[in-house]
Image: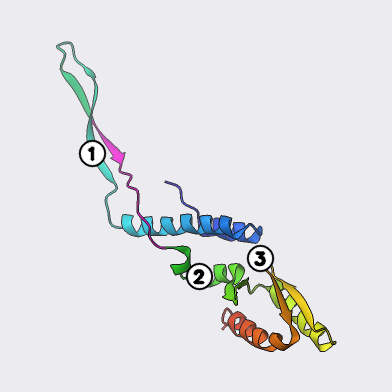
Amino acid sequence: MSYKSLNDVQEVISLGKPIEVVDMFLESYLQGIEYEKWAEGKDLTETIVVVVGQDAEGNDITEEQLVNVYTMVDVSVGVAQWKIDNKLEKSYGLDYNGYMVPFRNDDAMAMLQVKAAFEMGLAFTNIEFSNGTVMPIVVADFPAFAAWFVDKRNGYFV
């Protein structure tokens, strides 16, 4: 069985793929984690007897072979239930009023640019984040959002 790795998930996020594609990669990654938990401590091989031919009298000639046992693992854990690790969460983002907001360096720079624009008198703008999310914001809502953003981003470094 082949499952997606954490590196695969991070790569698809960094490429800015649609959320549906990211979700498929996350589900595959989660299935792999669940399979590993299930397989831990289990003997995933068994010995079978294989007929490899017949002798002159018509008797079967057998050979014992060691084979891998494959079992499908039912995974009921959804992406929404999975606690994404910090590195993935930083790129993928957290929900803020329906917008997935990531916390990468580019996103912090965008926040500083928006802050400067509002200080110069701009009343409304859109913030485009590194994951492709575009969030409209007005000057009155920016302080609450900025406080939330700074608190969440700071959590990755302390």
Judged by depth in the image, the label closer to the viewer, 2 or 3, is: 3
User: Which of the labelled discs sits on residue 85, or is there none?
Assistant: 2
Q: Which amino acid does the dot numbered 1 rest on?
A: Thr
Picture colour scheme: rainbow
Helix, strand or loop at label 1? It is: strand
Helix, strand or loop at label 2? It is: loop
Helix, strand or loop at label 3? It is: loop
Residue 150 position, x and y percent, is 64, 84
CB-based contact (under 8 Å), mark 2 and mark 3 = no
Q: Which amino acid does the dot numbered 3 rest on?
A: Asn
The residue that disc 1 covers is: 47
Q: Is residue 76 left or right of residue 131?
A: left
Judged by depth in the image, the label closer to the viewer, 2 or 1, is: 2
Q: Is residue 46 left or right of residue 92?
A: left
Which of the two labelled residues, at mark 3 and mark 1, occupies the earlier sequence position? 1
Does residue 75 show up magenta in the picture? yes
